[in-house]
Image (tube, rainbow, N blue to C red):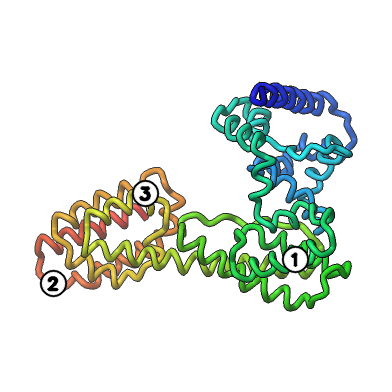
Amino acid sequence: MKKVLSLILCLILIAAAVSCAKEEEKNSFDSSEISFEIKIGSEVKQIFTDINSNEEYKSIIYTSNMINDQTGYYLREFDTRYFLNSKEDYRFFKFIEIYVRKRIFDVKVFNQNMKEMSNVHVEKKKDPEYTKLLNGSYWKLQDFDFTILVEQVLYDVKEGKVPSKEYIKLFAVYKHLVEIGVIRTDMEDVHTRFLVGYKASLTNEAKKNPNVVEKNEDFDTTDSIIKEFASECNRLKVAIFDSCIREKVSELFKNMADNIDEFYKQILGEFANIPIFEKYDMDVLYSKLENLQNSDLYNLISLLSTRYDNNKELLNLDSSNLKRLAAVIEEKTQNEDMTIKKALLGNLRTAIIKLT
C-alpha cells in the first residue's frame, strides 16, 4: 500500500511539475525575475540539475539564505512558493527533475527515490549530526541538546569526519550562530578548526579516489569572511588532489618496469582520463622507456594513439610534457648507433609529434 501511495504521490508531483513548466512557457509576459531568468536560459536552471537528494535540497535552501547567496535565490523562491507552511519533509525527487528536464522516466532513479522516501523516518535516526545544522532543524532542540550538538559537530569537523563538500556551508552556519550569540566562541578558532578538518577530510577522499575532484559550490555572496574561507578551501583542494594524483601516477609508472600488463590495464582503465604525463618527470620516464622490452615499447606507441583518440581535452593537458619527452628522445638518441630500440624510440617521438 505504501508503495502504491508513493507512486500516486510522485505521479501527481510529476504532473504538477510539468504543468508549472508549461505555464512558465505560456506566460511570456511574466514580469518576475525568476521567470525571465529561466526564459533567457540563465545558469540558474542548472541549480536543480546539480541537486541529487532531498537532504541536499533542504541544505541549500537553509544555508543559501543564511549566506545571502544570490545563486540560491531561485531555489528559495521556488520553495517559498510551493512549500510555504508545508510540513512535508520530503520535497525533492531527482527522478522528477530528470523527467521535467529530459522527458525521460528513469526507473532506476525512481526506485531509489521511492526507497529513500519510504525509509525517511528510519534514515532520519541514522543521519549524521551535522545535517541538523545544515537543514535548520537545530532550532527545535532544547538548549542542552543544542550545546551538545554544536560541540560534537565541531569535533567531527576538526577530525575530518564530515564530507569535504559540506564544510563551506557548515562554516557559514557556525559563523551565523556565533554572530547571533548562541555559540560563545572565537571565529578565528572556528576558522582554524574548519581548515584543519577540511584538509583532513579532503586528503582521505583524495586517497580513496584521486580521479574524482568534486567541485566546491560557488557562493555568490558579499560576505568577505565566507568568500575567503571558500577560496582557501578551493586552493587546498587543488593542492591536495594534485599531490595525490602525482603519487598515484608515480605508482602507475613503476608498473611499467615491474608489471607491464598491469600498466596497460591501468592506463586504459582508471587512468584513461587522467593527465598522467602532465604529472610525471619526462627524464625519469625516458630512462624507463630505455629499459622496456622492444615488444612493450612497440605496444606503447599504439597505446598512445588509442589513449587520445577522441579525447582532445586530455591531450591538451598532456601535450606540453609529451613534447618535452619527444625532445628528450631526440637529445638522447641523435648521436648513437641505430638499433631496433633506438628506431622504436624514434617512432614514439614521431607519434608524439603527430599527436601534439
User: Residue 235 falls in which quadrant of the image?
Assistant: bottom right
User: Which of labels 2 and 3 is toward the front?
Assistant: 3
Query: Where the C terminus falls, by quadrant?
Result: bottom left
Give the CA distance from mark 3 to mark 1. Answer: 54 Å
The residue tagged 1 is: 148
Question: Looking at the image, do the residues carrying marks 2 and 3 touch, with CB atoms under 8 Å apart?
Answer: no
| Amino acid carrying mark 1 in the image | Ile
User: Which of labels 1 and 2 is toward the front?
Assistant: 1
Q: First in sequence: mark 1 or mark 2? A: 1
The residue tagged 3 is: 308
The residue tagged 2 is: 336
| Amino acid carrying mark 3 in the image | Tyr
Q: List x then y, in percent, for residue 188.
A: 75, 78
Res. 251 visible in picture: yes
Tell me the SS state at disc 3.
helix
User: Residue 42 falls in which quadrant of the image?
Assistant: top right
Q: List x then y, in percent, for residue 156.
A: 64, 66
| Amino acid carrying mark 2 in the image | Glu
Q: First in sequence: mark 2 or mark 3? A: 3
Q: Residue at x 17, y 67 (%)?
A: 291
Give the CA distance from mark 1 to mark 2. Answer: 73 Å
Q: List x then y, in percent, for residue 232.
A: 65, 70
Q: First in sequence: mark 3 or mark 1? A: 1
Give the CA distance from mark 2 to mark 3. Answer: 30 Å
Q: Residue at x 79, y 53 (%)?
A: 136
User: Which of labels 3 and 1 is toward the front?
Assistant: 1
Q: How dense is the environment of label 1, judged by Cα within 10 Å: few (below 14), some, or many (20 and up)?
A: few
